[in-house]
Image: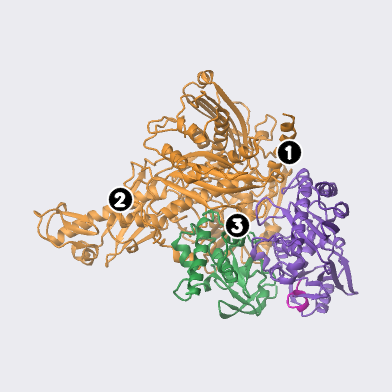
Chain colours: A green, B purple, C orange
Amino acid sequence: MAKIHVTTTINGAPTEFLCDPNQTLLDVLRDNLGLTGSKEGCGSGDCGACSVMVDDRLVCSCLVLAPEAEGMKIDTIEGMADGDKLHPLQKKFVEMAALQCGICTPGFLVASKALLAKNPNPTETEVRYWLAGNLCRCTGYDKIINAVMEVAAEMRGAANA
Amino acid sequence: MSEIQYRTAKNIKEAVTLMAAAKGKGYILAGGTDLLVQMKAGTREPGTIIDVKKIPEMVRITEKGGAFTIGAATPAAVIGEHPTLRKAWPGVVEAINLIGSTQVQGRASAGGNLCNASPAADSVPALVAAGCVVRVQGPEGKRDIPVEEFNVGPGKTSLKPGEIVVSLTLPKRPKNASDAYLRLIPRTEMDIAVVGVGVSLAMKGDKVVDARVGLGAVAPTVLLVDKAAKALVGSTLDDAALDAAAQACSDACKPIDDKRGTVKYRTKIAGVLLKRAAMIARDRINGIEHRGHR
Amino acid sequence: MPDGHSHPKYKWIGTRPDRPDGADKVTGRARFGADFNLPGQLVGKVLRSPHPHAIIASIDTSKAEALAGVKAVVTAKDFPEQANLIVPTGEMQVNLRDITRNVMAREKALYEGHPVAAVAATTEAVARAALALIEVRYEVLPHVIDVTDAMKPDAPVLHDHMITEGVTPAPTKASNVAKRIEFKKGDAAAGFAEAEVVIEKDYTTQAVHQGYIEPHAALASASEDGQVQVWSTTQGHFQVRGFCAKLLNLETSQIRVTPTEIGGGFGGKTVVYLEPLAIKLSQKSGRPVKMTMTREEVFRASGPAPGGNVKVRIGAKKDGRIVAAECTVEMQAGAFPGSPVGPACMCAYACYDIDNIHIVGFDVVSNRPKVAAYRAPGAPISAWAVESTLDMLALQLGMDPIDLRLKNAAKKGTKTAYGVTFNTIGLVETLEAIKNSEHYRTPPKPGHARGIAAGFWFNVGADSSAASHVGEDGSVTVISGNPDIGGSRASLALMAAEELGVDYEKVRPVIADTASIGFNFVTGGSRVTFATGLAVVNSVRDMIRELKVRAGKIWNVDPEGVIWENGMAKPAGSNVGDFEPLSLAQIAAQAGKTGGPINGHAQLNVTGAGPGFGVHCCDLSVDADTGIVTIDRYTAAQDVGTAIHPSYVEGQLQGGAVQGIGWALNEEYIYNAKGRLDNPGFLDYRMPVASDLPKIETILVEVLNPTHPYGVRGVGEVPIVPPTAAVGNAISRAIGIRMTDLPMSPPRLSEAIDEATPRMAAD
């Protein structure tokens, strides 16, 4: 199969890669670029563990073809912390034990950040529905929802201060 | 192994040319939320994947004389964010916004949902109720197809070789008209509809003057249920009219038993949802909001 | 640090610090099973049987082997035959004859998805193409999926050699019933004769999957000198080593298994699927081989938890005292014997002090994937039936369901049907915690109903090893050998810090590979914080003993003259001498002069695991037109012993409760008429999503385990036992119809309501 050359931006860095026409963005992130923070739980868009942002839209990277990334802006879990400073969501997830095994955590964090960018003041129900595409089998979701609600409140507080 | 190609079309003409050249092995990539899953499962094996998201008219929403035209590849999330479309066709928008998770919403399109031709597609019953017209373009030019005639069986459309869907047009709304879509799923999210019902109503005072009903997941294709609409027209949505319309929906069902539901259950739920969707559409006409959670 | 801590006498235990692996897991840095790669690695893929039951007449791999890029192909011929022998591997009992056949089918394919061959190739695409070139000639046999069908005399028999054990006289004909087991206490017949109320009911449950989000993955690298390295996502890397050594005729010391971070297991990652295949492919190809399962493969071929039929009969006095209880459990084992029917029987009435009990269980094979452990294996199945029947009893007697359970609750000194007499347990305290909770004292909202259920699990101890090292600066490394599946690093570090009297942040817990620490039994049975925790505590105590020796050397006094307090060596009394206390760092700095490195070790077979009891309370409403259930409020209470890190204890209760809610409402394996699984994906295998659920409130009841220095009990498994009946009892009270079959999905509830409506109208 002839490879396709793709030029894109990943976590702010200009990035080039070669991919097969039918390779997914998730496969390229994990296998070609070593960005293994995005996880494959199902490969069919049903678990959300591979959530990334493509041009500021939350998507499952297993449902995006790698060649589509041409000219686009991709943001993954690896770009969420600012240098050695964790994003408030990352910090709060650890503080509030919003993870047990941690396999779903990158997807939840990317999806939660997308939610707060769109809706800084979500109700608990809105958080639960927004995150319904992210499966977690360990926590029963409770502590994840609490962490997102708390970060939302803190970020609103900081914005108003 | 056959060579698979990925091509980006810059305009509709180019997409049509690529599609025709692929000789039946061409697949349009809009959101890809069905196509990529089917490729992985091996149930669809494209020769050429034609990405249409770089074509401006495929990914935009335009309003002209009260009618809305939605580019076939416009992501569901973009449709959900369109204020005037949401106001005019809340049922269509909520149906499109029920396709998959938030992540899927970032990609999935109404055109793709239609072309995947699943009888359980969430957007289609609402589009049928809305009287949507599908604009198609192929080697022999353009044509329009009423949405209820677009699909001919599970996974089968009425597209001719080389034809692609360009846009979906929703007609101008009269005053005091609205719509609603309800589906039954076992969970609150992330499921395929066991039954889906779209209802579009126009009222004068407390009387229904026009109605259309679309019914999904109960037959090989989404159904336009005229009998249910007739039962509603002229009524005040009283119990007798709703019962008759619900019965008409149940009567229209030709479902199957499968992992998602039984014949008996689907037949019953079609009636239950018809009543509930009609009441929501009426509420909306009366200015009472019903909103989703996302 | 959120919240204060619950144990004033401790500095660290009961606090909620950040977990040591937290930053890695929120940044994507943590490496799970599929995240490991080696230079030159190949991709391994498995060819699986499309038939649920078929003789494998022949396999021709020649075309696959000839394909460019294919480096190795293996079939059952590459794995030595094993004796029909149950042997201990680690501490688990496995029949080697069965496990080699589950890893790679030999004479027959016994379930859809059963591996029949595997390939290693340079790319995934080549590996897939190679699978398509393998020619397998099957002679398809009639199949049987359902337990009831499998037990019929004319059922297709899976194993021609299988004669039911536990029946006298032994049957002469092979059947699908592997074993009959029985537990008796008192005289059930006499008990029923004395009963004033007798309730009898039949229940069914369906197979459910553990549903861990991370699919199985393994990477193996075999050298020409016979040494093997494996990276695997597993709950027990020592078990992986043990199984692979047996199946491949290798010495355990030749196999070094490194556990990756593990993306959930719940019991499902205590067995091997890919590892022996990856090793054999690596041996044959001379290259590292990486294998990962797709989600579909996980559903079709990794162990689900069984479904079963349960018949319950309970006799009581009018005051609610239970005088007799019977239970029969018929349980799916999958394609090979070994369902958790034993624990299902043992747990059935373990919550209650009943004089006369008779329990019978059957272990039944059918053409399904071999079942694996899932959180309190077996217990939720019998609890579903027993706790539902108790709810019927409460309704019939007009008793509060908690009071009924309190009247019969097991206590210290209660003898169970399986012969064990309980030490200190906390069922009464847990029932009272629910009874006194704000939730229970508030009536359900209008249109809602409430269900209560209790549950029990033994918890286990078993083998653990640990080591502790002091660095030259006085910081501490604690090494153990159990994969951290839900925050156990944090609990181990908290106990080490408490014991040693140093700050939690000074302790780094490390999980070592099989070559770097002594044997550790699996992360399972709710044992890590309890048993490996004890090993860690003992290794720290061993290190403290050495620290006292070193302080004695510095002071030139006997070690007996030194005590360890708050992280310092101090003179035991004024008669020892007037010495300034020595800190850990000060002693460590002089280690070279006082005898070299300072380490501690411990190895134990831990007994005395404290059993756990849970009581759950569920409020819900049922949409009578659609059968949709909406859970409005849910509280889980449990006697957890000492909650070392309360957040992660709460998390266990919440996660287990939600898995149980899924089991109750929607999760099930659905087979079609051809014996193929119809819902092998997260779309149609419906696990709860965030929007399905309310908050899961928790009440931690700390009834200390007297056998553990910090009073630890296992907590992970109990929470999945009560939910099915708590939800079911609420549903049955909401609709006035007793539900007996899981899952209580919308179509099933709707049908039950519709069937009852004309009947109720006629009444």
Q: Residues within 10 Å of mark 1 (few under 14, many from 20)?
A: some
Quadrant where the C terminus of chain B is found in the figure? bottom right
Res B65 → quadrant: bottom right
Label 1 SS: helix
Magenta residues span B49-59
Camera-side mark, 1 or 2: 1
Q: Which subunit holds the residue at mark 2?
A: C
Earlier-in-chain disc, 2 versus 3: 3
Give the class, few, some or many, for how many residues have Cα within 10 Å of label 3's Cα (few <14, many ≥20): many
Q: Amino acid at mark 1?
A: Asp
Dividing the picture into quarters, in which one does residue B169 lie?
bottom right
Residue at the (83%, 65%) spot, across then down: B132
- Specify whether B173 is left or right of B97: right
Disc 1: which chain? Answer: C
- Establish if C114 lies above or below C72: above
Q: Amino acid at mark 2?
A: Asn
Residue designated by label 2:
C538
Q: Is residue B55 magenta?
A: yes
